Image (tube, rainbow, N blue to C red):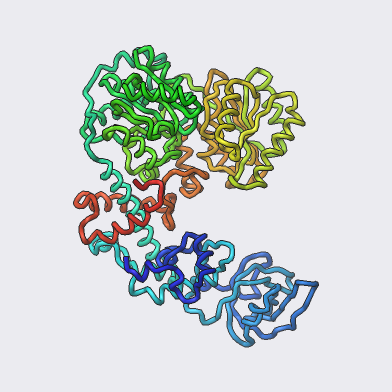
Amino acid sequence: MNSELDKPITYLKGVGPRRAEIYAKMGVFTVYDLLCCYPRDYIDLTFTTPISDAALNETVTLRGKVVKKMPEARIRKGLSVFKAVFTDGTADITIVIYNSSFLFSQLKLDEEYYLVGKLSGNFIRKEINSPLVFPGNIPDKLQPVYRLTEGMTQNLLRGNIHNALDSCRKFIFEPLPKHIAADNGLCSQEFAMSNIHFPKDRRSYELAKQRLVFDELLVLQLGMALLRTKTRGKTAYQLKDTDMSSFYSALPFEMTDCQINAVTDCISDMHKEHPMNRLVQGDVGSGKTAVAAAAAYFVFKNGCQTALMAPTEVLASQHYETLKGFLEPLGVRVALLTGSLTPKQKQTLKQAVSDGGYDVIVGTHALVQQSTSFKELALVITDEQHRFGVKQRAVLAQKGSSPHKLVMSATPIPRTLAMMIYGDLDISVLDTLPKGRQPVDTYAVTGKLRERAFNFVKKHLDEGRQGYVVCPMIEESAMELQDVKTYAKKLKEGSLKDYRIGLLHGKLTPDKKEKIMADFKAHKYDLLVCTTVVEVGVDVPNATIIVIENADRFGLSQLHQLRGRVGRGQYKSDCVLITDNVNDTVRKRLKILSSTSDGFKISEEDLKLRGPGDFFGDRQHGLPKLKIADMSQDMDVLKKAQLTAKQITHSDPLLQNPENKGLRELVDKLFTGSDTEN
C-alpha cells in the first residue's frame, strides 16, 4: 500500500492530536482507515419539496433563500434562540436555531441554501428546528451520513474525508488484477473511493458500492482460503479403517441419517494425509455429541487420543458424563480436566494423560496450558466454536503432530454465511432432530398478559419442574444490570415468593456463574432469572418453561437458542415470549418463531430481517467486521467473490504472484488483530 495512505491521521490538515484521539475510538488511525469509513446513509438534495406542499411532522428537503434574520432572543439563562425567515417563492418558513450563534452567523441574507429537517408549527406558520444546512451551489447532491462517536460531527468528518481524497486521490492503489475487474464489470478503486463518499449521482454510488462490496467479500474469502492453506500440512495420524459396529449397537438410540453422514464425513477425512478440519453444526438437541463420540471411538480404535474442549466447566462436565456413558462400556478411558481440580489431582491426571493412560480427555482451557501434554493426540474437538475462534483451536492442535480438528456449533446458520465464518472448515449439517425429541410450544404475548404468563410458570413449577426467565441486557451497562436484579427481586417478593429463585448475569465471576448453573441443575433453584449468559449453558432435562421478556430486543436465532434451554427431557415444554412492542415487524418475526422449530429456517429469516451484523448478538465469532458488505443483500456478489477467490487460489494459493500483491496486503490488513489470525 502507498505510504501516503498509511500515514497517521494527523498527516491531514485540520486533524490534530485531540481529534486523532476521537478518531482512535472509531478505529481510525491512518488516512486509509479514514477513507474506509463508509457512509451509513445519504441525504439526497436532488429531490426538494415546495414549502407550500411540505407536510407537518415530516422530514423534508427545502431549497430557497434567507430573506430576514431576527435578533437573538434569550428565553432563560443558558438558552438562546435564533430565528430567520426562509422562502422558496411558494411560501415562507421560520428557521429556529437553539444556542448556536455560529450556525446562525453562517446563514447569509439573499443566499440560497438547502434545509433538511422536520417541520413543526401549524398550517398558518410553519417552522423547521435546527435543520441541516447546505449551500445552494453545493456540487455533491448526495451528501454522506456517517456513524459518529462523541466529539465528532458530520461536517467535521465530511471535511476530513474531502481533504483525504483531495490530497491522496492519486495514491489510491488498485488491488484487483485488471482481468478480474473487467470480467466482473467493476469500476476502478479510485472511482469507487471517491463516489462512495461523494457520489455524483445514484448510478455512480451504485457502481462504487458494487466494487467495494466485491473487494471486501473477495478479500475475506481469500483470507479464509489462506488460513486453510496454512493449516494444510500433513498429519502424523492418517488413520486406518476400523469396525464401528460395536459403537452403533451399544448406543441406546438409533442415529439419524444426518448423524451417520456426519460420522462418515469425519472418518473419511481422518483417512487422508491432511488433517481433518470439519464443522458439525446443528440445532440444540440434534445429536452433535453422539457424532463427536463416534469420531473419538474411531480414533481410540486406531490407538490414539482425543481431546474435547468446552467453554465452561459446567459444559465440560456435561460432555464428560455423556461421553463416559457412550464410550466407557466399550473400554474407552475418559478423563475430565478442569481448573477446579486440586493441584495434586491435576498433576496426577496430567501425568496419566501424558503417559497414554486416558483415551478421551474432556476439559476447559486447562487443556491448552503448557503443562498439559498428550501421548498420541490425533483428534481435537472444540464445542461452541464462536467462544474459541481459530487461535485457540490452533493452540490446542499444536499439542499433537497436526491432529485432526472437529468443531461443534449449536448455532444453525445459513450455509452461505457458514462458509463466510467458518471458511477454513468443511461443514457437516445436522438438520434432523433425533426421534423422541420434544418440540417446544411457543407463545408470543403482550405485557398485558404477564400475570397470566407467570401463573403458567407456577403450574410448571408446582409439577416439580424448573424454568428460566430471560431479561435482555447490554453487557457493561449498570442500568440494564440493575434491571435484571430489580426484576428478580420483584418476583421474589411478589407472585413467585414461595419459590426458590436464582439470579445469573454477565457481571458475575466465572466461578460464581458455574456454581449457580450447577446448583440449578441440582434443583437447588426452581427458577433462574438470567440474561443471555444462559444461552450456551448446561443441560437441565427438568427445565420445561422459559419466559423471555422484551422478546423484540433479541434476534430470531438468539431467541431460538434460548428456547433450546428447555425441551431437553421427557416432559412437555413451553416458551413464552413477552413484548410490549407490537409493530408489524415484531409481529412478523415472532410469528416465524412460533410457527417453526427448525433452526435453519429461522436463521434464514433472521438473516433477511436483520443482516449478519446483529446475527450473533454480542458474541465473538471470529469474523472480521465487514464495513460495507451486507450478507442479506449481497448474496449475488458473494457468489461472484467466492468463484473469483477459487480461481485466484487455484493458481496462487499463498497470493505470492506480483499481480496479487495488493490483494495480499488487504488480506493481511483485514485479518490483523482479528480472532481468525493464526
Identity of the residue furthest to the left in this view: 651
The quarter of the rendered structure image containing the N terminus is bottom left
Front position in the image: 578 or 76: 76
Measured as percent of width and height from the top left, residue 276 is found at 28, 34
Nearer-the-camera pick, 357 or 535: 357
Q: Residue at x 31, y 53 (%)?
A: 641
User: Where in the figure is residue 222, as x and y percent of width and height?
Assistant: 30, 51
Q: Is residue 282 visible?
A: no
Q: State the image quarter where residue 336 is shown.
A: top left
* Residue 403, image x, y percentages: 29, 32
Is residue 503 toward the left or the right of residue 154 in the image?
right
Q: Nearer the viewer, residue 93 or 310?
A: 310
The residue sitting at 24% across, 29% down in the picture is: 237
Tell me: residue 161, above or below residue 497: below
Q: Of all residues shown, which one is farthest toward the right?
A: 76
Q: Is 43 on the left-hand or right-hand side of 237? A: right
Q: Residue at x 47, y 59 (%)?
A: 27
> Relative to the observer, which residue lies in front, 257 or 656?
656
* Up-down relation of residue 63 to residue 186 (above or below): below
Q: Residue furthest front?
A: 344
Q: Quadrant of residue 324?
A: top left
